[in-house]
Image (spheres, helix red, strand yellow):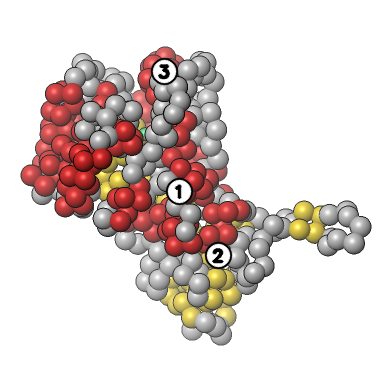
Amino acid sequence: MSFDIIVAGGTLPDGRVADIGIKGETITAIEPKIEAEAGTVVEASGDLVSPPFVDPHFHMDATLSYGIPRINASGTLLEGIALWGELKPLLTHEAVKERALAYCDWAVSMGLLAIRTHVDVCDDRLLAVEALLEVKKEVAPYIDLQLVAFPQDGFYRSATARENTIRALDKGVEIVGGIPHFERTMADGTRSVAELCEIAAKRGLMVDMHCDESDDPHSRHIEQLAYETQRLGLQGRVAGSHLTSMHSMDNYYVSKLLPLIAEADLSVIPNPLINMMLQGRHDTYPKRRGLTRVPEMLKLGIRVGWGQDCVLDPWYSLGTADMLDVAFMGLHAAQMSSPADMARCFDMVTNVNAAIMGLDHLGLAVGKRASLVVLDAGNAIEAVRLRPDRLCVVARGRVVSRREKRDAALSLPSRPASVNRRHKA
Ligand SMILES: [Zn+2]
C-alpha cells in the first residue's frame, strides 16, 4: 500500500499517537505505525494533529472593512448596524470579493477550513450575495463555505427584505437567516421567525437565526424558534446564534426554556469575542457579560459550538481568523475551567461546529475527507492555552499551508538557548 501523504507520529485530540495515511482526498489509514511509501511525509512527532477548525458564524461580506468609512465609537451592536448601513452603498463587487478572499487566505493559514457566513440581503443590488457566491466557488477546493441569507435590517422592518431573501435563496444561498430582535416590535419578531422557518421548510433548507442578541431579558425569540422547529419538523436543521438575552433572563423562565431547546434539537452558536465586547454597554456596575448560558445548555445535551462572528468590521475592531482565540474567550467567559471542559472547548471549535454545519465528511477517521491541521502544541488543552502556530494544514489531500517551528532564542546566563512555552509535565 502507498499513500500520497503520511502525517507521522502526531498526537490526536483524544490522546492517541498515530500515523495518518492519505490517498487522494481521503484519509485511508490511522494506525500506530504505517510502514509504507508516501509522496510526502509530514513529520508531526510530539505535535497535535487535529481535524480542521470550523467557524459556524461569520460575516464575510463585512470582514476587513474596519475603519471604512469610520469606526464604531460607542461599541454597541446598534451603532455597528448603523455604520454597516453607511458602508453598504460604498461596497463594490470587487472590493467585497477581494476582502473575502484575503480573509480566506488567513483562514487557511490558521487551519480554518469550513465557514458559515451570513450575507446581508438588505441591498436591492444583492451585491454581496453575488460576490460571496463567486468566492464560495473559488475557495471550494480548500474551504467549505456556507451562505446564510441574512436580512440585517429586519425581515419586516426593511421594505424589500422579504423579496430579497427569496431572491438570494433562488440564486443559491442555502440557509435561511433572520434577526427577530431587530424588528420594530416583539410581535413582528415573532412573526418573522414563523415566516422564515416556513420558507426554510418549504425549500428543505437549514435555518440559522441571529436571535435575542440583546441584554433585554424579555427578548425571547429563541422560544418561538424552538416552537417553529418542532411545528415544521425542522429538528436538527436549525441553529440559534447569540442568544445573549438569556444571560439576563429570569432563572425560572430559563428552566422551562432550555428543555424546549433540547427537545427541538436546536444548535446554539454563542459568539464570545463579539458579545463580550458588544453586550452590557448600557450597564454601569455590575456589568453583564453578554454570553448565553453555555454550561447549563451543555449539561442538557444541547449542541453548542463557538462562533467567531466578526474580524475587523463595523462590530469588532480585532480578530485573526483563529478559532482558538474564540475558544479561549468562550472558556473564560463561561468559566469552563475543568480539564474536561477545556478539552471540550477545543472540540466545540472543531467537531461540534462541523456537526452544526452538517459537514459529516470532516473529522479524523478513516473514510473522512483528508483535511487536518498540525499544531505546535502537545494536546488540545495546550492548544487552547497557547493558540499556537499551525505548522501544516492539509485540505482535501493537499498541503495548503506550512510554517517552520519558531522557538524564541534566549540570551541568558545559565539558562536554555531557546524556549517555546510548551509545558512538559
Ligand atoms: Zn452575526
Q: Residue at x 84, y 54 (%)?
A: 410
Q: Residue at x 14, y 23 (%)?
A: 187
Q: Is residue 70 visible?
A: yes
Mark 1 touches mark 2? (CB < 8 Å): no
Residue 269, label in figure:
none
Q: Is residue 62 above or below residue 380?
A: above
What residue occupies the far left of the structure in this picture? 231
Q: What is the distance, in whole Å, between disc 3 and disc 1 at their CAs?
A: 29 Å
Residue that badge 2 annotates:
379
Q: Is residue 269 left or right of residue 391?
A: left
Residue that badge 3 annotates:
79
Three-letter amino acid code at the position of disc 2: Asn
- For the residue pair 363 and 283, the one nearer the viewer reads as 283
Which tag, 3 or 2, sits closer to the chain's start? 3
Three-letter amino acid code at the position of disc 3: Glu
3 vs 1, front mark: 1
- For the residue pair 323 and 74, the one nearer the viewer reads as 74
Percent coordinates x, y for residue 263 in the rendering:
16, 52
Residue 335, label in figure:
1
Q: Residue at x 45, y 48 (%)?
A: 335
Q: Is residue 392 visible?
A: no
Which tag, 1 or 2, sits closer to the chain's start? 1
Percent coordinates x, y for residue 367 in the rendering:
37, 71
How many marks the image carries: the answer is 3
Three-letter amino acid code at the position of disc 1: Gln
Dot 3 falls on a residue whose secondary structure is: helix
Q: Is residue 80 left or right of residue 247?
A: right
Quadrant containing the C terminus is: bottom right
| Rendered image quadrant of residue 58 | top left
Q: Is residue 135 above or below residue 219?
A: below
- For the residue pair 374 and 316, the one nearer the viewer reads as 316
